[in-house]
Image: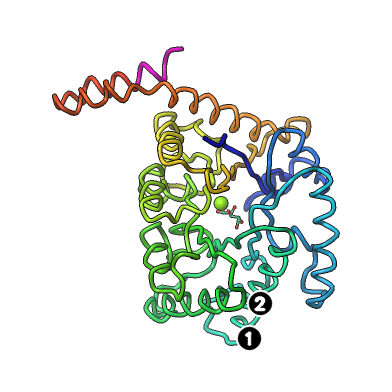
Amino acid sequence: MAKFQFSVGPWNVHSGADAYGPATRSEIDRDEKIRKFAEMGFSAIQFHDDDAIPNINQYNEEQIKEKAKELRKYLDSLNLKTEFVAPRLWMDPHTKDGGFTSPYEEDYEYAMWRAYRSIDIANILGAPMIVLWLAREGTLCAESKSPVWATNRLVESINKMLSYDPKIKVCIESKPNEPIDRSFCGTMGHVMAVSAATIDPSRVGGNVESAHAILSGLDPANEMGFALAFHKLFTVHLNDQNSIRYDQDKSFGVENLRQAFNQVKVLKENGYGNNGEYVGLDVKAMRTTPDENSYEHLANSMKIFKDLEAKAERFDYDFQKKCVETRNYEALEMYVMNLLMHD
Ligand code: GLO
Ligand code: MG
């Protein structure tokens, strides 16, 4: 069985600015972060289109491809793969009201331009898919957009991406809210339904982020299991989250170890990774973290994952079966507690 391989994005090391205060750490150069990720044992990098090509709006299609080729050389020199490219539509003034579901035609055209460019960049970097985190595809004012129209527009937009490139996969990262109030594609259930409505469902899947599932009031391992049942768990964004509040992106497992264990277990049980899927981390350092510990949350998340993997390895399926046969779920639960609490 393939060993789990890890991936991460440059945004996972950041300067600590939040909605209420400025940066608390110095900025680190993108290529320096990437070099450090390789040293830490990551196998692949996740990119926003404008992480790969900073100031992407200033360049034409050919220039973007040329710049992507330069980045590819750097990644090859470090023996790193690219997992995906994601159009960072939420940052641009054109898409302040969403892109694929913007009521303005010019914003829609711009969003599609960024999606096509992301596909071009993914092809050059050797990534099989683009990720759509649909940050602003929803409403701030509930009456401003029809959810029926918006859902159909989303399917239409994905169909255009699938037609633009016959091989590219489109992976939707669901999230119920933040920064938008009401998202059109909040859970894996939504993602699977959108996938089924496209012209090639086999190329449209999901990215389960632990924190996003928790924000939806759902269990992340169950969300992963649901997508796995349809062979559509294209990637994961592991992290943790204290209940339904602002999106926290805590280190994996620090808030709810049993829930984290079950995520590792469902991935392991279902051969996740055997088709080249990565264990993606989407974690942020706490704002108070000093410069010298800028990467610690990543190292911690990886260590917690690996330690839980070792626990999952020891999971006694015979005992589990016996407990189910006798309906002794108290014993099964205590077995899991003991497994997690003791060596
Ligand atoms: C925010 C998302 C974000 C995406 C990333 C890739 O809530 O989790 O980090 O995963 O931008 O599109
Ligand atoms: Mg994410």
Q: What stretch is highlighted in magenta?
A: 337-343
Task: Tell me if 71 is positioned left or right of 243 in this view.
Answer: right
Tell me the residue that label 2 is attached to: 94
| Amino acid type, residue under disc 1 in the picture | Glu
Q: Where is residue 204 in the image (x, y as percent from the top left)?
A: 48, 65
Relative height, residue 147 to residue 324 (above, below): below
Q: Position of residue 2 (x, y in %)?
A: 55, 37
Would you say the magenta stretch is mainly helix, strand or loop? helix
In this orientation, which residue lies closer to the viewer: 121 or 255?
A: 121
On screen, 230 above or below 253?
A: below
> Is 141 situated left or right of 332 in this image?
right
Local crowd size for mark 1, using a 10 Å CA cut-off: few (<14), some (14–19), many (≥20) = few
Q: Which mark is residue 106?
A: 1
For residue 246, above or below residue 25: below
Q: Check the image and tell me how it is coloured.
A: rainbow
At 48% from the left edge and 80% from the top edge, which residue is drawn?
Answer: 156
